[in-house]
Amino acid sequence: AIALKYDIEVKDLEYVQFHPTTLYSAEKEERSFLISESVRGEGAKLYNKDMERFVDELLPRDLLTDAIFKQMKKDDREFVWEDLRSIPQEELDSHFPNIVKYCKSKGYDVKKECIPVVPAQHYFMGGIRVDYSSRTSMKYLYAVGETACNGVHGKNRLASNSLLESLVFAKRAAESMVFPARKKEWKKGCFYKRMENRDISYENLISLLEGKIDSKRAALLMEN
């Protein structure tokens, strides 16, 4: 909303990913706890209201989400069942302790019973349009993480790949801030060694992030 307000270019806002299995709650705002794909990889099954399998549990997120929504409509229910009981109890405790603990806090014992699950909005592939150095269409403004869109995830991000935008492109953004004039000269090597040769130091960059120096002063340092 802020980007649109200030005419900052955005991209692919319609590309929204749904996670196929979150723990169902009658309160929609509480449908946020993910039941990881890993449990299906270890053998968990999905059932309809008649306790019958209706889908290949290892389908990609978008296809599985679609299948679950269709089954929910067919069953006239707000969830389907997920059964983790085929996973050895020791493995549940060692590999999925958070799932076991959270479900128990909501009244479900995953070792003894099925749990209700429902798809939920999970990740935006779209966002503020950035280049591969995380620069936006507004000078001196960078965007990283889920708020940014550089196109690396296409229309449907693969599971566990969100760190690409959060860490890799965050580092590229930091390098671009520190070395804007040397962008074409960058070579592989130590980020901190290159920083020693610039007028803006690591300490100045931290000061900017902490609000101890203003953006105009930082911009002048970066342009030198």
Image (cartoon, helix red, strand yellow):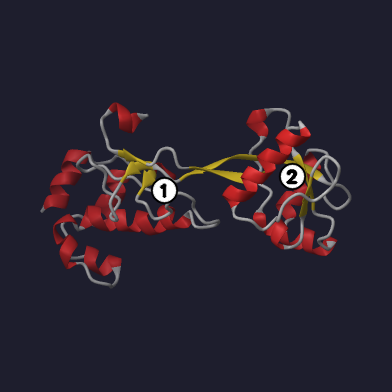
Query: Which residue is under mark 2?
Result: 102
Residue 194 figure quarter: bottom left
**Residue 61: which numbered mark, if any?**
none
- Farthest residue, direction left: 224
Query: Which residue is under mark 1?
Result: 145
Q: CA distance from mark 2 to mark 1?
A: 27 Å
Is 101 or 80 nearer to us in this picture?
A: 80
Is residue 149 toward the left or the right of residue 76 in the image? left
Answer whether residue 31 is visible to the viewer in this image.
yes
Give the mark nearer the N terminus: 2 vs 1: 2
Is 182 or 192 nearer to us in this picture?
A: 182
- In what quadrant of the picture does the N terminus appear? top left
Residue 16 placement (x, y as % from top left): 49, 41
Tag 1: Cα neighbours inside 10 Å, few (<14), some, or many (≥20)? some
Report helix, strand or loop for mark 2. helix
Is residue 117 toward the left or the right of residue 193 in the image? right
Q: Residue at x 29, y 71 (%)?
A: 190
| Disc 2 residue type (three-letter) | Tyr
Is residue 124 toward the left or the right of residue 175 in the image? right
Is 128 or 204 nearer to us in this picture?
A: 128
Residue 144 placement (x, y as % from top left): 37, 48
Residue 153 figure quarter: bottom left
| Disc 1 residue type (three-letter) | Gly
Q: Nearer the viewer, mark 2 or mark 1?
A: 1
Report helix, strand or loop for mark 1. helix
Q: Residue at x 32, y 33 (%)?
A: 3
Residue 196 placement (x, y as % from top left): 21, 65
Number of numbered tags placed on the structure image: 2
Residue 174 figure quarter: bottom left
